[in-house]
Amino acid sequence: MKEFSPGPVENHRGREAGAVVYPVYSRRSKGLSVGINLFPDRKVCSFDCPYCEVFPFQTDLRFSLPVMEEALRGILAEAAERGIPLRDICFSGNGEPSLSPDFREALEAAGRIRERFVPEAALVIITNGTGLLNDKTFALMKEAALGAMKLDIWLKLDAGSPAWYEAIDRSAIPFDALIGSIRKFVPLAPVTLQTMICAVQGREPPAEEEAAWVRLAAELAGSGGSGPGRGPGVQAVQIYGKARPAPEDPLAEALPQAVLEKRAAALRAAIGTSIPIEVFP
Ligand code: SF4
């Protein structure tokens, strides 16, 4: 098992060494988070974000459910022994977790372990949302978010317009198809929207992108009906900046905090204060 030495995430090189389960202090979780990485052997993702922090690597390791379960139980036991409260168990890692063939089983196993050892901790998936184009994954995520597992879905919404989506997410999946699936999903299940704001090729998101993103985020925020409280719909919005190195630096660059705050203020002006909008520079 990886040594228990959680610290602020400076970069993700530890994960690239093949860790399946790893403790970190997470700025967005505001405390200890235990990450689960379904891709210890290579990056697997349907996006190719220029700000992506996964450095090129390859190992001979394969994901193994028993290894994941044992490592997770070990880290939880160690955190408990040291009296460190756990904020969440989080599926993230080297790519898009929902693309893994082990996703369902790993999610269910993590849910069971959370329930038994740390029922107060959240179970989170950080996803780019492309799994929602697959009916089975759509149903799994919905069921996991609404049911006893109470999965917190942190759903990427980096762009409000096809042009910025092309620049910041560089995916082969068409923008309209992805947004269509997100539009279907949000009224059915609780989600947290998460948006990276950074410059790409020296260019900030242009004014028309900001306006399109605000329109789309406001539409999604209004589509669940119930606001925060685990009913379907948008529970919170996270606007975050580029804080760590990426292999393609300086293709994507951090922007001043004021740019992120301005975006948050624009959304607040559109939807009011019923949904928390947080900025993580
Ligand atoms: S969605 Fe996440 S893992 Fe995939 S390329 Fe973007 S930042 Fe990297």
Image (tube, grey):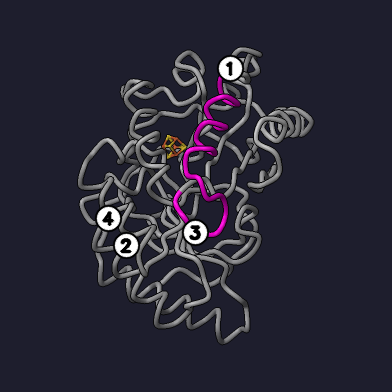
Of residues 273 and 27, which is closer to you in this image?
273
**Residue 242, located in which quarter of the rendered image?**
top right
Of residues 58 and 31, which is closer to you in this image?
31
CB atoms at circles 4 and 2 under 8 Å apart? yes
Question: How much space separates mark 2 and mark 1, taking CA atoms?
Answer: 35 Å
Question: How much space separates mark 4 and mark 2, taking CA atoms?
Answer: 6 Å
Which label belongs to residue 209?
1
Ligand 1 picture quarter: top left
Q: Residue furthest front?
A: 225
Q: Residue furthest bottom?
A: 81
Magenta residue check for 148: no
Give above or below for 236 relative to 68.
above
x and y percentages locating residue 135 in the rendered image: 21, 42
CB atoms at circles 3 and 2 under 8 Å apart? no
CB atoms at circles 2 and 1 under 8 Å apart? no
Magenta residue check for 223: yes
CB atoms at circles 3 and 1 under 8 Å apart? no
Q: Quickly name the residue at label 3.
A: 230
Q: Residue at x 39, y 57 (%)?
A: 145
- Mark 1 or mark 3, which is nearer the start of the sequence? 1
The quarter in which the N terminus is drawn is bottom left
Q: Is mark 4 within 8 Å of ligand 1?
A: no
